[in-house]
Image (tube, coloured by chain):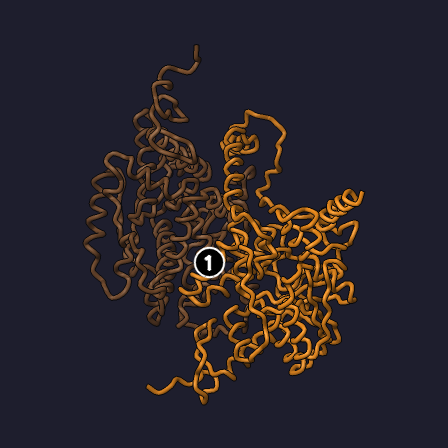
Amino acid sequence: MAPALCVNCKTERALIKRPKNHAKLCKVCFIAIFEDEVHHTITSSQLFQPGEKVAIGASGGKDSTVLASVLKTLNERHEYGLDLVLLSIDEGIKGYRDDSLETVKRNAVQYDMPLTVVGYDELYGWTMDQVVETIGKKGNCTYCGVFRRQALDRGAKMLGIKHVVTGHNADDVAETVLMNLLRGDLARLSRSTSIVTGDDRSEVKRSKPLKYSYEKEIVLYAHHKKLDYFSTECIYSPEAFRGSARSLIKQLERVRPTAILDIVRSGEDMARLVPGESPSSCACKGNKTSPMVPAEDDIGGCGSQNGRTSGNEMAAMDKQLRENEAHEGLEVDVAMVMSESKNNGVKKHKEVPIRSGNGTSKSAPRQVRGNCSRCGYMSSQEICQACMLLEGLNKNRAQIQI
Amino acid sequence: MTSTPRVEGSLSRPCMKCRVQEATLDSRSQPVCRDCFAKFIAAKCIKQTGILGKETRLPLPTTGGPPTGTRHYMVGLSLGVSSTVLLHLLSENIEFQLARGRNAPFDLTVVHIDTTTTTTVTTPSPAVEEALTRYRTRYPRFTFHRTPLSSTTPTPSTATPTPLPTAASRSDVTRQLTRRALLEQARARGCQALLLGHSTTALAELTLAEAAKGRGFALPWLVKDGVAPVGGKRKGLGGGGGEGRENGDGGRNEDGEEEEEAGKGVLVYHPLRDALRKELVIYAGLVEPPLTDLVWETKDDAAAAVVSHKDLSIEEVMGRYFAEVEESYPSVVANVARTTGKLVRAGEGEAGGEWCGLCGMPLDEDGDERWRGELGIQERSDTGTGRLCYGCERSTAG
């Protein structure tokens, strides 16, 4: 049998079966198509402004390494006019980040981009090792996770940069869509599919240019471009809902390769159906920029950001829901009883309606946007979670010193 | 002295509900007896049909005067466990009312969409006819119809000019067309509502499966109760009437005109939406004689030995997944369907939306616009069935 030819150039031998659609491509065409698709995402979502200074959140892993490489290539090829820098976070765990930070340092040389490593100590006044010393090994992951969420934004702010890009890929987004459906979290569902997060209030906006790129293609791209990345198998177990969604996605991908992208599409569409959301998210129509949504704080990628968990979130939620159901059974839903009697045309009761019965949808619980009164980071609370945790830590430190 | 009733004391494990019978089952982490379990399941169904009864009006007599007669519903019977349990519970409900000297609350037409004749096979499967004969004998009160999927519009062959590429595509297209065929049958037979046997688990599966097939936009139309578009033609859907009752609680529209308008679409209800699949399976075995004798299993459930992922459908993957989740976290399953119920039904603009030529669901203009030219998925030219939604594009793409 003659070797199959690349379906794109039709001259070279096909070496790669594209994970996204099983198209057979040669190496050169695969790399070109991968880059073109990221370019399409960037232009159609109008992610960047010429002259913009953009920090690439770099962990040394495959996603952020590919992101840095592709952005460098596209910035030169299509003259985006971007000033790209690498930004890495050091949690301050001795021995843990050494290898990956070395990788990022080599990337900085390879891509000729300045690198800034910001430590938790600079951002919060605490390294993770110090946190563990204070509160012990149990529960310290909560701190690490909460600190990590804000670290890139805080680091960017320190550098005077207003835009951070991260390496979240299509698998991560799809996983988050399914996870939020399982958790019944519509507010997060509507946020998680957005390519840009952060609104006018936030000083730093975040975006995910690899949102439509398959994890498998990112690995292939890194392999064929011979990129220098650090492959970490995360030592922490992912949160149960995410783990469950992740394995489901892998199965779906085997049955139908486009499923990951189809879930992303479903997620984007459903985001518009969440009561109270803006009906359109199209940026290419009418030349407006993508609407920005509050930062999504828990989109995955690295399991460790969810902290080491006991793995029983599903059980805990199941229990909680069951208790709610039991309580519902005990109480009388006055509004429902009334609306039923109203519909019956039996108007014996003359009570004042409790709910306005206009048939409009119950809106999903929406968080009120605001900023932390201490650090200014976007938060639905008066004081953000990181500042709350810091307060506790600092009290502890004071006591220890006494 | 103990104040506990004597009967309870004599039982090793009293039923948590009646406290007079021995508990033989576990229902939602409570020990219960057979009778209480059966009542519990029946109550779930009666509650929903009660709500439906308020949504539908009695037909007005041609001679004028107050409405008389009986509500008329259609049951979509797949010959599987859930729809069989639904049929049985509705039948029991009618018998109960009649035994008390009341009118029957509704009467039923039962339709089975026969998918065995879709492809090259044109003769009806004898197994289907045999199964329907069993149902007719058991429920002589109702009329049963078998409608071949191949006789519906769009037919599987016009909708899909090329042979469908994968098991996942075939399963998806068959499901969409079956649903459409049921809606068309319900309208053609003048039924006021189409009742489907989906359990909580089935609705959760449907939610995640349709999301995985790119039909997130249509989900509220598929999962919520309410008026559904039929056959892709414009229906006069009243704002309140079409919204589904989850969104309309406290504000069901009483307006007579709206009711008439809504009558042009078909009201779709899932009376078993509050029962888990495993509960329906238990129930089917409790009934005398067991409903499991009626059920026609098309495939061995012991499909555990998957030869290749290519032979699996998205629905099968979801089925396996939720069978596990249902076992350990039943409330999480219930929460999925409830959450989807909160989403808004869209695609019904003032000017009238367009519907997919295959599944009949509203098209998502904004989403399609946003997605255009994206991401390494080839666009197809028109196939003669009109525009397709994203999900149907995926399933029919070669």
Nearer to the camera, A208 or A15: A15
For label 1, the SS is: helix
Label 1, on which residue?
Answer: A247
Question: Looking at the picture, how far across and down is residue A233, in whole percent?
Answer: 54, 63
What residue is drawn where x is 46% and y is 72%?
A19
Instruction: Name the chain under label 1.
Output: A
Three-letter amino acid code at disc 1?
A: Ser
Left or right, B9 with respect to B342, comes to left
- Residue at 52 percent across and 59 percent down: it is A175
Of all residues, the one furthest to the right in this rendering is: A402
Q: Is residue B261 above or below residue B177?
A: above
The quadrant the N terminus of chain A occupies is bottom left
Can residue A40 be seen at all in this image of the molecule? no
Q: Residues within 10 Å of mark 1 (few under 14, many from 20)?
A: few
Residue lying at 34% horizontally and 72% vertically, measured from the top left: B162
**Chain B shade:** brown
Q: Residue A245: where, in percent of width, then height?
A: 49, 56
Q: Colour of chain A?
A: orange
Left/right placement of residue A36 relative to residue A372 reads left
A215 left or right of B7 in image: right
Q: Is residue B142 visible?
A: yes
In the picture, the quarter occupied by the C terminus of chain A is: top right
At which x and y percent is residue A285?
A: 63, 69
- Give the quarter of the image for residue B61: top left
